[in-house]
Image: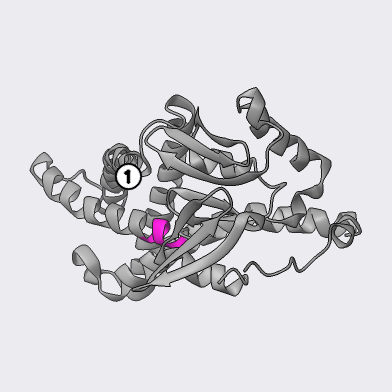
Amino acid sequence: MPAPMRETAGDIREMPATAVRASRITEALMPWAKTYGIAIGMALFLTAIAASGTDVFDLPARFLYWASLMIGGTFIAHGVSFLMDRIIPGRGSNGLRIVIHLVLIIVPITAMVWVANIVINGVPLPLKYLPHLLGAVAPICVAMTTLYCMANRTPMQSHAHAVTEVVALDANVFRQRLPFKFRSADLYALSAEDHYLRVHTSAGQTLILMRLYDAIRELDGIEGSQTHRSWWVAKDAIEDVSKEGGRVTFRLKGQVSAPVSRSFQKALKTDGWL
């Protein structure tokens, strides 16, 4: 059964404004620190193995070379993500978006490496080396994208900090997306189905056109967590936890069963869900 919340709404409302601001600043900076930390880590690895013939440089110059390319490539990837979110918001599965993102970043990052080599060598590389350069850049782009996805595979939480007026407004915005009969119902779970989102409530189920990721961001008013790449569950809706052959399932109100994937089990156990 779900564990009780660690903080009460009163405790949270009494947090000093300075602490709230500090928390928001930290929350905003953490994704950037994680992303560019991965870039520096990859630069250290490529420096250590002297990748792509960079053993001709001494150690400090080699690290400077790879760090510049990794940070520059990460900046390009951020720019592409920014444009994708505005041009094709919410379209396609996460896997498809990752593939499109990779295709879009490989060419400009290869161009960046081309320019970097011109700066270092003083002369442009012959065009016949372009396919080789593209082949060297592509695996690094794939590795960086994989590391970034793995580093961000944690449950999206919507806990008690949601009692603020701004967040309550966000939760109300989500409810306004639902058909009228479901707006005042208790929310049990969300499950992604292609481009649609199935909303499980005390009034039954309904489908809306929305990404799971975007919906979770509007649910800070409800204590819950993502339990699977295509499921979010409200903690109060859990009636039982079943385990069979290493598979964990939440039995929810309304006779709904929500899977719990292995990638989310550790965090959910830490938070007292399992």
- Let me know if residue 158 appears in the view: no
Taking 208 as reference, is 248 above or below it? below
Question: Which quadrant of the figure has residue 169?
Answer: top right
The image quadrant that residue 3 belongs to is bottom right
The residue nearer to you, when weighing 171 against 67, is 171
- Quadrant holding the N terminus: bottom right
Quarter of the image that includes the C terminus: bottom right
Q: Is residue 124 visible?
A: yes
Q: Which residues are magenta?
A: 147-151
Neighbour tally class for label 1: few under 14, some 14-19, many 20 plus, Cα within 10 Å: few
**Apparent side of residue 108 relative to residue 181 in the rendered image (left or right):** left
Residue with the most extreme front position: 255
- Residue 173 magenta: no
Q: Residue at x 17, y 45 (%)?
A: 125
Horizontal and vertical percent for residue 41? 41, 68
Quarter where residue 7 is shown: bottom right
Which residue is drawn at the image coordinates 40% and 64% (left, top)? 64
Residue named by callout 1: 95
Residue flagged by tag 1: what amino acid is it? Gly
Question: Is 25 left or right of 21, judged from the image as shown?
Answer: left
